[in-house]
Amino acid sequence: MSKDHYLKSELYRLLKTEDTVFDFLQKGSLEGVWYWNLEKPEDEWMSPEFWKILGYEPDAMPHTPSSWQSIINQDDLQIAIDNFEKHLQDENHPYNQIVRYKHKNNSTVWIHCRGIAIRNKDGKPIRMLGAHNDITKLKQLEEINKRNLKAVDELYATAKLDLEEAEDIFKNLPDATLLVDDCGYINKLNHQACVLLGYTEKELLCMNVDDLVPENYKKNHPKMRQEYLESPSTRSMLKSSRIISAQHKNRSFVPVEIKLSSIKTRYGQRVLVSLRDFTEQSKLIESLKLALEQNRSLNKEASIDSLTNLKNRRYFEDAALREFSNCKRNNIELSVAIIDIDYFKKVNDKFGHIVGDNVLKSISQELLKYIRVGDVLARIGGEEFAILLPSTSLLAGEVLMDRLRTAISELQFEDNVGTITISAGLSSMSLNDNGYQDIIKKADDALYEAKQNGRNKVVTKA
Ligand SMILES: Nc1nc2c(ncn2[C@@H]2O[C@H](COP(=O)(O)OP(=O)(O)OP(=O)(O)O)[C@@H](O)[C@H]2O)c(=O)[nH]1
């Protein structure tokens, strides 16, 4: 057997002889000591500290077990009695439990209560020595800790749910969506992206968005990505949308509308790329373009004289109708000239129709030289032309028509045709005119007069 340290032996001796040593030890390390006479069970000494913890005046409290048994939690008392009885029968069974007392102010005081039976030489328990520790603060901290842990658990559960919800939203976004890092690598994608681009999720997660760009964009794409990362606000969420092509796994091109948005994550800047399949819309746009083109050429055919490329009668009449109401409403002058080639039948008869056609074309080109923007020159019959002259008075119109007439008469036509003259009737809109037809009628009458009076003339009629 090892010998006790001499200081331990000395301390034990001191404890037997010096009360102050015992008092110091119990005050310094415990919140209460109790000592129970099991041969006279109504006697139990409780140290003053025990009562102080519970808010009572120690001197006023009797040294009996009933004094504390009345304020201990009754469930805890049962546990303590149970342990007490077991310990009396078997010294190896510890008398050790945490019990709750009711403080004088009704609050709960948690006490760690331990004890040991002191037995006589026959082994019969005759005394019980015990110690109390006030662990209320510890219990309160434990409570706070439990509450905090519960709150953390709840927060974690909510965050988990939020995350799952966000994942679900991302997965079910109607457009193909990629989450791309600042180097262009795809970090995340939804099923629609696989459908649109023809790659599996595993393949796309190893790819860079540059790989999905058509060949002619590939070179510039990294630079464009960089520019976007540097100033994403200029193409902020959903504002920047462009239609380009994405390259499918099978090397075909899928027209897509692309929208970008920049996201700051804890891993750094990320770009959310949304790709909407534009195949159907592109087809529609193409067919609309075609229809528009066809419509344009149909319109052109409907308004152009195919021989001279001048406007035709239909166009002229539409323009006359428009200009008549516009000029009338705004009190603007409007003149109309009808021109007819003199003795054109003779040209045809003498040189043939093809030469006649050439003459018509040459005269058209010459007339065009005198036409301003806003005037309308048309071939309205075989060898008959008309000019619509908005913002032109009868006098100004006459000057113009005379210059025209002179110019034509001075032209030398090919194929030995030589010179040709024209006659013209000119009229202007007056208060009595109810429609453009009235002005044309007056111009026709004036033309008839010019023909009657020897041709190569301009006759005016207000
Ligand atoms: N080459 C050619 N001739 C045309 C065309 N349209 C009409 N003509 C001819 O133009 C001629 C018109 O003759 P007329 O109406 O008798 O008049 P004109 O001979 O010019 O005599 P006036 O008008 O009285 O000076 C006819 O011979 C038509 O065949 C055309 O597109 N091409």
Image (cartoon, grey):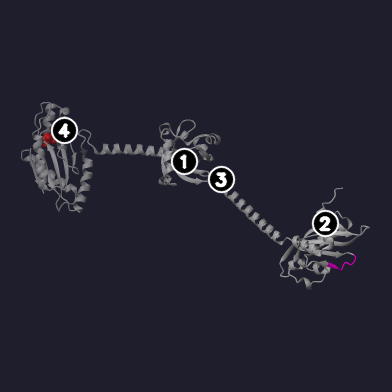
Which image quarter: residue 63? bottom right
Point out residue 109 in the picture as x, y percentages from the top left corner: 73, 64
Upstream in the sequence, badge 4 or badge 3? 3
**Are the residues at dot 4 and dot 1 in contact (C-beta closer than 8 Å)?**
no
The residue at which mark 1 appears reads as 275
Which callout, 4 or 2, points to the residue nearer the camera?
Answer: 2
Q: Marks 1 and 2, how far apart in space?
A: 88 Å
Q: Residue furthest bottom?
A: 60
Q: Marks 4 and 3, how far apart in space?
A: 76 Å
Disc 1 crowd rating (10 Å Cα; few below 14, some 14-19, many 20+) is many
Circle 3 SS class: helix
The residue at which mark 3 appears reads as 167
Residue 345 left/right relative to 159: left
Upstream in the sequence, badge 4 or badge 1? 1
In this view, 142 is above or below 51: above
**Amino acid type for the residue under numbered disc 1:** Leu
Q: Any magenta on residue 230?
A: no
Upstream in the sequence, badge 3 or badge 1? 3
Residue 381 left/right relative to 272: left
Q: Which mark is residue 360?
A: 4
**Amino acid type for the residue under numbered disc 2:** Glu
Relative depth, front residue between 25 and 277: 25
Upstream in the sequence, badge 3 or badge 2? 2
Circle 2 SS class: helix
Q: Which residues are magenta?
A: 39-44
The residue at which mark 2 appears reads as 10
Residue 210 left/right relative to 446: right
Q: Which mark is residue 392?
A: none
Residue in view at x 16 percent, y 39 percent: 385
Upstream in the sequence, badge 4 or badge 2? 2
